[in-house]
Image: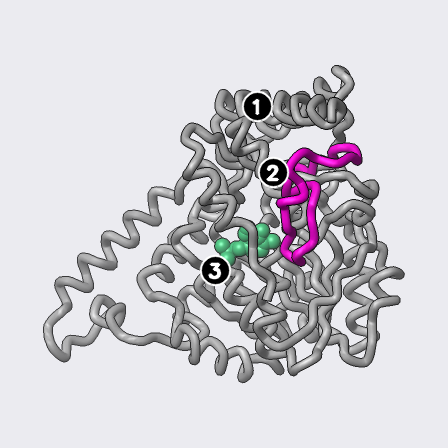
Amino acid sequence: VLSPVIPELALLVSGTPGTLSLAQGMVGWGPPKAVAEAVAQAVRHAAAAATPGALGAGASLDRYGAVAGDPELLAAIAASFTEHHSLDLQASTLMATAGSNMAFHAIAQAICDSGSEVILPLPHYFNHVMAIQLAGGRPVTVDAGLIPDPGRLAAAITPRTRAIVTVSPNNPSGAVMPRPVLEAINALCAHHGLLHIADEAYALFVHGREPHWSPGSLPGSGAHTVTLQTLSKAYGMAGWRLGCMAAPRQLAEALAKVQDTVLICPPRLMQRAALAALRAGPAWCAPRIRALRHRRRQLLDAVALARQEGLPVRLLAEPDGAFYGLLAVEPGRWPGESRAAGPSGAAGHGLALMRRLVLEHRVATIAGECFGLEGGVGGLPVGGAALRISYGLLSASELEEALRRLFCGVRALLRQRSEQ
Ligand SMILES: Cc1ncc(COP(=O)(O)O)c(C=O)c1O
């Protein structure tokens, strides 16, 4: 199973005091106030009702709950899916989980036998790779373009294929996939009897002209579409661990087996928190997400300035969604790269660059290799390096400084390279 580079990066950062992080996939805000109030109230009630054998809402928090989640939360998830994303849930089952990664894990366990294939367009999200491998399946990565060409995905389908995964808005590129592309992928899945797994962790994060669109909103698509969403990003609740999914009803029994085995039920206190967050809804998230546009502009301006100054850098995709940009740096041999082994064991330009930027310039990013991007793949020229830049967490002034360090660092390392 793939070893993610993130723990190694965290070690590097903790050993390099003062490092600014453009690496973390989180926002800088916390949950709605109503979440803390709902949790405090639930705890108070639980304490008041904590007499042996007592029944009632408070006491029930102390006990195991329904495997897929408490009915009140599932009703709120259904309302959120239908009202805000127009999902057709006629043929769907709903499940709350401890984060949407756990939902993806459950789906992978439910659909993969040994050797089953799941198609992941590049760049991929590393935890998807790991979940498929843990389930005994084989991730089939396909370089179909950052906005994937459905024809190239179709060419990768074999009798062992079980699903195609899309992530829109995308981690790590920030690209938002247009509706016709997602529609074509969804139709491909229906035609070949595959699942379309749509990871929509960043559904509310759109900053450009392309709106977010859920393939699960196509009438009748619920029978072959999985929609994954989470409170981690838009509601600033990454550490609270609450995600959810809509999946074809015929998978309900298998999904319940996985969840019952690993979690029994989603943590019930967190379910109360999630309910309060969903009641605050996208209207609460919207001004916070809008405020990120200024940070996105800072990133675009910094890249434009670096290019004006002659640095061979560019963003691989329009960063119109999520809070990421994928920076490409021109081909060449990076100092120290011979020591850099990628997740696949291969030397990686992005990994070498990522490590040196932390150690010598105190700025953290994530190498493209972690998302399957090596030179010659995903529009990155052979010998090029890619870095994921997250602008979600830092304040405007910290981001300014982090971007200054990043481009100073790239310039200094390029200079060293040309002097070698
Ligand atoms: C595409 C994608 N899916 C899922 C997750 C994880 O979400 P959760 O915190 O709900 O497990 C992330 C986190 O970075 C992500 O980028």
The answer to whether 116 is drawn above or below residue 145 in the figure is below
Amino acid at dot 1: Arg
Q: Mark 1 or mark 2, which has the lower sequence index?
A: 2
Q: Which residue is mark 3?
A: 99
Q: Quadrant of residue 180?
A: bottom right
Give the mark toward the camera: 2 or 3. 2
Whether residue 212 can be seen here: no
Q: Quadrant of ligand 1?
A: bottom right
Please say whether residue 122 is visible from this viewpoint. Answer: yes
Q: Which residue is mark 2?
A: 354
Left or right placement of residue 167 versus residue 240 in this view: right
Q: Marks 1/3: CA distance?
A: 33 Å
Q: Locate the N terminus by quadrant.
A: bottom right
Q: Quadrant of residue 236?
A: top left
**Residue under the image location 67 percent in, 34 percent down:** 335
Q: Is mark 3 within 8 Å of ligand 1?
A: yes
Depth order, front residue of 108/368:
368
Front position in the image: 35 or 385: 385
Could you tell me which secondary element the residue under label 3 belongs to? Answer: loop
Q: Tag 2: residue type?
A: Met
Residue type, mark 3 in image: Gly
Q: Mark 1 sits on what residue?
A: 405
Which region shows up in magenta? 323-352
Marks 1/2: CA distance? Answer: 13 Å
Left or right of 192: which side holds 23? left
Please tell me whether mark 1 sits on a helix, a strand or a loop. helix
Comparing labels 1 and 3, the label whose residue is closer to the camera? 1
C-alpha span from label 2 to label 3: 28 Å
For the rendered model, the colour scheme is: one colour
Q: Badge 3: how crowded within 10 Å, few (<14), some, or many (20+)?
A: many
Answer whether labels 1 and 3 touch (C-beta < 8 Å).
no
In this rendered view, identify the residue nearer to me: 181 or 336: 336
